[in-house]
Image (spheres, helix red, strand yellow):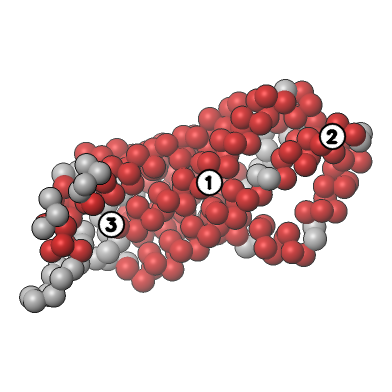
């Protein structure tokens, strides 16, 4: 598989579409802040081990989600190409920035160990409200990730690769998570997104090599394309 570019990309893309959103959903389950105080300054003190585990899981789920988005773009090589390139690029940038925000978690813990929760939150808010932090890491990047992915899935549905319910469920899950306070309901919203994306991951893993290659643009006689190249590297 590792010597065949087509099979490697198919398996890697399918696996990431399952693993990345699942990590995100599990992170919400183990996060002490989901079931108690959502402020990291408090939840880190309640259970430092689980708080660190969820932070790492969120970090890697966002990084892997960025790679999974690149896998989705493969099935948009023939239809909605420009839409996929624009939306996919913005979504990837959104998830990369989201992963960077997780570095604030240990800072919240440190502040919580040395200050009352209210004071720790006040200091943190002053840090996060700095223009460089707001526009470099939060806006519009956070929305590009959690809103951009469902929009991208609409394009995947238009190609015929996804069922109609996939972008709908993902949109309800990830979109709702931005509109509600962080708490137990977030497990349901992240879980809904995981179900939608995992269905695409399973479908990719079930594809044959030829089905995967068929998404490459049709070869022009006399010109080397990914399709013709892949057929020579079996």
- Disc 2 to disc 1: CB gap under 8 Å: no
- Identify which residue is drawn at 85% across, 38% down: 111
Q: Quarter of the image holding residue 131? A: bottom right
Q: Residues within 10 Å of mark 1 (few under 14, many from 20)?
A: many
As drawn, the label of residue 71 is: none
- Identify which residue is drawn at 20% across, 63% down: 226
- Disc 3 to disc 1: CB gap under 8 Å: no
Q: Is residue 210 left or right of residue 79?
A: left
Q: Secondary structure at mark 1?
A: helix
Q: Given the current orientation, which residue lies at the most extreme front position?
A: 3
Residue that numbered label 1 is attached to: 62
Q: Residues within 10 Å of mark 2 (few under 14, many from 20)?
A: many
Report whether residue 184 is seen. Answer: no
Q: Secondary structure at mark 3?
A: loop
**Mark found first going from the N terminus, 3 or 2:** 3
As drawn, the label of residue 112 is: 2
Q: Is residue 215 left or right of residue 144?
A: left
- The Cα–Cα distance between marks 3 and 1, rounded to whole angstroms, is 21 Å
Report whether residue 225 is seen. Answer: yes
**Where does residue 63 sit, x and y in percent of width and height?**
51, 47
**Where does residue 55 sit, x and y in percent of width and height?**
63, 36
| 204 to 139, vertically: above or below | above
- Identify which residue is drawn at 38% across, 43% down: 17
| 135 to 221, vertically: above or below | above
Quadrant holding the N terminus = top left
**Where does residue 31 sit, x and y in percent of width and height?**
64, 29
Q: Secondary structure at mark 2?
A: helix
Q: Quarter of the image holding residue 187? A: top right
Residue that numbered label 3 is attached to: 75
**Mark found first going from the N terminus, 3 or 1:** 1
């Amino acid at each position: 598989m590792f010597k065949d570019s087509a099979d490697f990309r198919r398996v890697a893309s399918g696996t990431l579409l399952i693993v990345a959103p699942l990590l995100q959903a599990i992170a919400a389950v183990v996060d002490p802040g989901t079931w108690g105080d959502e402020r990291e300054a408090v939840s880190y003190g309640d259970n430092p081990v689980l708080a660190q585990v969820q932070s790492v899981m969120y970090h890697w789920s966002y990084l892997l989600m960025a790679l999974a988005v690149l896998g989705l773009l493969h099935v948009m090589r023939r239809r909605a190409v420009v839409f996929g390139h624009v939306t996919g690029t913005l979504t990837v940038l959104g998830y990369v920035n989201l992963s960077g925000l997780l570095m604030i978690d240990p800072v919240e813990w440190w502040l919580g160990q040395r200050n009352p929760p209210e004071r720790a939150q006040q200091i943190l808010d002053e840090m996060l409200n700095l223009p460089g932090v707001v526009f470099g890491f939060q806006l519009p990047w956070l929305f590009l990730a959690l809103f951009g992915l469902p929009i991208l899935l609409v394009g995947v549905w238009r190609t015929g690769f996804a069922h109609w319910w996939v972008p709908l469920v993902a949109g309800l899950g990830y979109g709702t998570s931005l509109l509600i306070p962080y708490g137990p309901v977030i497990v349901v919203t992240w879980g809904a997104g995981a179900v939608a994306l995992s269905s695409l991951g399973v479908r990719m893993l079930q594809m044959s090599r030829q089905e995967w290659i068929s998404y490459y643009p049709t070869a022009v006689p006399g010109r080397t394309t990914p399709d013709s190249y892949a057929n020579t590297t079996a």
